[in-house]
Image (cartoon, rainbow, N blue to C red):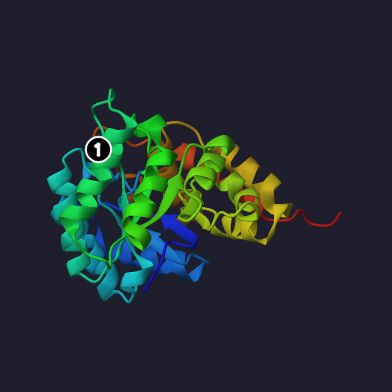
Amino acid sequence: MTDCIRGLWSAMTTPLDADGGVDHASLARHGAFLLANGCDGLVPFGTTGEGTSFSAAEKLAAVETLLKSGVRAEQIALGTGSPAIPDSISLTRDMMGLGLVHAMILPPYYYRDVTEQGIEDAFAAIIDGVGSDRLRVCAYHIPQISGVPTPAPALGRLRKRYGAVMAGVKDSTGDWNSFLAFRQHAPDIGTLVGSEVLIARALKEGGVGTICGMVNIVPDLVKAMFDGDAGTANMTAACALIEQPFLPVMKSILAAQTGDAAWRSVRPPFRPVDANVGVRIARAMDAIRQPRAAE
């Protein structure tokens, strides 16, 4: 049975068509690009994929596109977290109906005055509601965006209760102590980092990989982080070039790299950034990626 997500997985950006819907042809091309450039798997509709801006039907249709394009079901993890537990259960069940087993699940967000036990109850309710031993949950910890943490002790207890179904956690805080807390309190689950600059360090301390956004634009630099500390300086420099707002800027860079202006499209409440922003950052990243000619 497939276990937790391991290796290099992409938090995919989501291409849009002229009407603001998912551009399925572009999505398939981008998925093929990522897999051909070192990714072990794809995570559509996470934070980098504007996941909370798409309906369940849109997400499932996009997954079907990736499957039809040749991506294997075990290479896809769908973001299925929702403020409403029944919605998370329904989407996760439907995802599994397409053959997927990996679900990246946020704790229910919106209410901030919740307890650790309440968050544990929420994950338990989702797992019980889906009711499948095939399910592999990767909890998502990004409190700086969602406003709600995924407490490490709660995941440790969930692992003891559900075994392999509570498979992993993606820690996107960028905080090393947060990563260590997951390793301490939930040592039997696979801990992945979202911060690219921590990949090499995390692997040395028992981490199992990354689900990250920068691989959309600099897959070579991210892949190098799996070879040790040598790539950390380049990765740090590339990350430092990213400006806010992160998602529109990321898409503007992709537009510059691919020559496809459609990549600049985002869903409200975001708005596209100036095309020159992407061009400028893409050129700066090329300077990092390409060794200077010998003088």
Q: Position of residue 284 (x, y in %)?
A: 61, 43
User: Considering the image in quadrants, where does the C terminus appear?
Assistant: bottom right
Whether residue 48 can be seen here = no
Dot 1 lies on which element?
loop
- Choose between 18 and 176: the one closer to the eye: 176
The relative height of residue 162 versus residue 145 in the rendered view (above or below) is below
Which amino acid does the dot numbered 1 rest on?
A: Pro
- Choose between 113 and 42: the one closer to the eye: 113
The residue most toward the right is 295
User: Is 284 displayed left or right of 24 in the figure?
Assistant: right
User: Is 143 displayed left or right of 95 in the figure?
Assistant: right
User: Considering the image in quadrants, where does the N terminus appear?
Assistant: bottom left
- Choose between 197 and 110: the one closer to the eye: 110
Using a 10 Å C-alpha cutoff, classify the residue at mark 1 as few (fewer than 14 neighbours), some (14 to 19) or many (20 or more). Answer: many
The residue that appears at 60% across and 50% down in the rendered structure is: 202
Q: Position of residue 210 (x, y in %)?
A: 50, 54
Please state the total of marks drawn on the protein image. Answer: 1
Which quadrant of the view contains residue 128? bottom left
- Choose between 156 and 34: the one closer to the eye: 156
Q: Position of residue 72 (x, y in %)?
A: 34, 74
The residue that appears at 62% across and 60% down in the rendered structure is: 226
Q: Position of residue 193 (x, y in %)?
A: 51, 48
The residue most toward the top is 113
Which quadrant of the view contains residue 10? bottom left
Whether residue 224 can be seen here = yes
Which residue position holds label 1?
Answer: 108
The residue that appears at 32% across and 77% down in the rendered structure is: 70
